[in-house]
Image (cartoon, coloured by chain):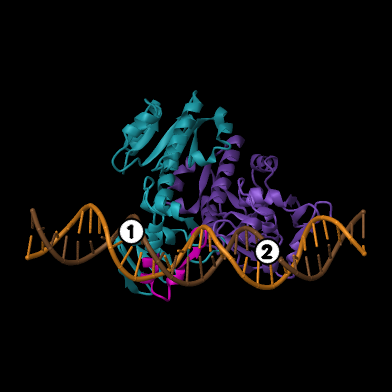
Chain colours: A purple, B cyan, C brown, D orange
Amino acid sequence: MEPLLIYPDPPQAELARMLDLGGYSWKAVSDERAATSATPDDGWGGAIIAIGEDSETAWALLRAIRRADAPIEPLLLLVGGNRLDELELRDELYDDFCLDPFHPRELEARLRHLFWRAGAGAAPELVEYGSLILNLETYQAAIEGEPLDLTYMEYELLKFLAQHPGKVFTRETLLSRVWGYEYYGGARTVDVHIRRLRAKLGEEHANLISTVRSVGYRFGQSRWGV
Amino acid sequence: MEPLLIYPDPPQAELARMLDLGGYSWKAVSDERAATSATPDDGWGGAIIAIGEDSETAWALLRAIRRADAPIEPLLLLVGGNRLDELELRDELYDDFCLDPFHPRELEARLRHLFWRAGAGAAPELVEYGSLILNLETYQAAIEGEPLDLTYMEYELLKFLAQHPGKVFTRETLLSRVWGYEYYGGARTVDVHIRRLRAKLGEEHANLISTVRSVGYRFGQSRWGV
DNA sequence: GCGGCCGGTTCACAGAGCGTTCACCTATGG
DNA sequence: CCATAGGTGAACGCTCTGTGAACCGGCCGC
């Protein structure tokens, strides 16, 4: 997970200890310029801004963050009880706040909930293996960015295989897991679908699906490095 | 504004006083049944649930609320410091929480922020996708500036699809989400409406709705990024 | 009340896409 | 070198979807 942006620098010892204990990576900055220049390649994973004595500076930093091209989310404030009224009319500048001084347990719970909320909204259901991507919501597949035009059964079969990379499945297992438990048909059906999958994956990636003679098929590399 | 659902009944005096002073209308209930029967015509404006001694009952109530046809939002918990760990793995059951006993000012700030968030995120009256625009207030639709003359069901179907671009829906899902949960009719009904939608969208934009064979229909192109 | 219109649902049919099967060929290992 | 397993091409037939049209119920004006 990307590191958290912490303000000010240095943060209060309580906060630093709680973050370290909670396994969060973080970096403290002292102003907007420092925040910009220290931005990780993948952006910040979130921010915790303490509204201290010089609250105007903190608010200015928050406005800058929210205006930026890649707004940081989630954004949590640490605010003293005597500054609560400053939150009013600034709703757009934060996602949650925590009274300072804080209970470590409360702050931890708030962070967890914020990250859950951020993650729950966006993330589409994806199955990935190397450059292969299956989007389970849109029923689309792509390899190295190139969309694959798969039929329904091809998609289902590839999905099942890619969800268990490295594992070998017999034809019978595939028939029952992909086609359905009560399915009764020839085992060669699997062969044909595997063939078409290999063809559509392209010569370059056809070896993603390997044949295990006398057993069945395996997707991806074996765990033993064969 | 619609009244707030408060649990338990009666609420602690501090909470009642803060709500009254803050100008909130509210109604306390003692269990799920009371909550259902006391539901205002326009639904609840939100809920404040205190996790007390009998936390299991409160969690059950929350689960029922979130499962209901019209989930109550926003949902704020009052939770004692010694019960903080119960929040873990229940993220989907609340929007925010406040330590109990609470500062009236903090609770007020949290309520204000929650309502602000709910209002800010509340359905924009426009749904847009490419050159397609749906005006939810006036029930009008247009593509490339050309108004579309849609019937009620056509409009509802297009609205639902356009609100979830890229995602594939089965006919059954569409029937339950667009036509209504209890609807029981032929799945071919969906086909016919899709056909008329495509016709009215015009040859040029008919491909906005794509068929996913053996699955259902998808509106627009998938977004791999989001 | 009655007849026509409008919108939603259902039906029947046709066409195409796709899964399955079969026959034949190639690869592999004993 | 044989036996067996897997790859390949093609054909068959089912299932799903698109489409035209009929049906049905509600609404409105005459």
Q: Kindly identify the amino acid type of the residue bearing the numbered disc 1.
A: Met
Disc 2 target residue: A197
Subunit bearing disc 1: B
A28 with respect to B134 (left or right)? right
Q: For residue B141, what is the image quadrant?
A: bottom left
| Element assignment for label 1 | helix
Q: For residue B190, what is the image quadrant?
A: bottom left
Up the image or down, A214 lies above or below A205; here it is above
| Element assignment for label 2 | helix
Disc 1 target residue: B153
Q: Kindly identify the amino acid type of the residue bearing the numbered disc 2.
A: Leu
Q: Give the range drawn in magenta.
A: B195-216
B101 with respect to C27 (left or right)? left
Q: Residue visible at 47% across and 29% down?
A: B58
Circle number at residue A74: none
Depth check: C7 or B26 in front?
Answer: C7
Residue B60, horizontal then vertical, whole percent: 47, 31
A38 with respect to A93 (left or right)? right
Q: Residue visible at 48% across and 66% down?
A: B210
* Residue B185 in view here: yes
Residue B5, horizontal then vertical, whole percent: 37, 35
Up the image or down, B100 lies above or below B216; here it is above
Up the image or down, B156 lies above or below B199; here it is above
* Residue A80 in view here: no
Disc count in the image?
A: 2
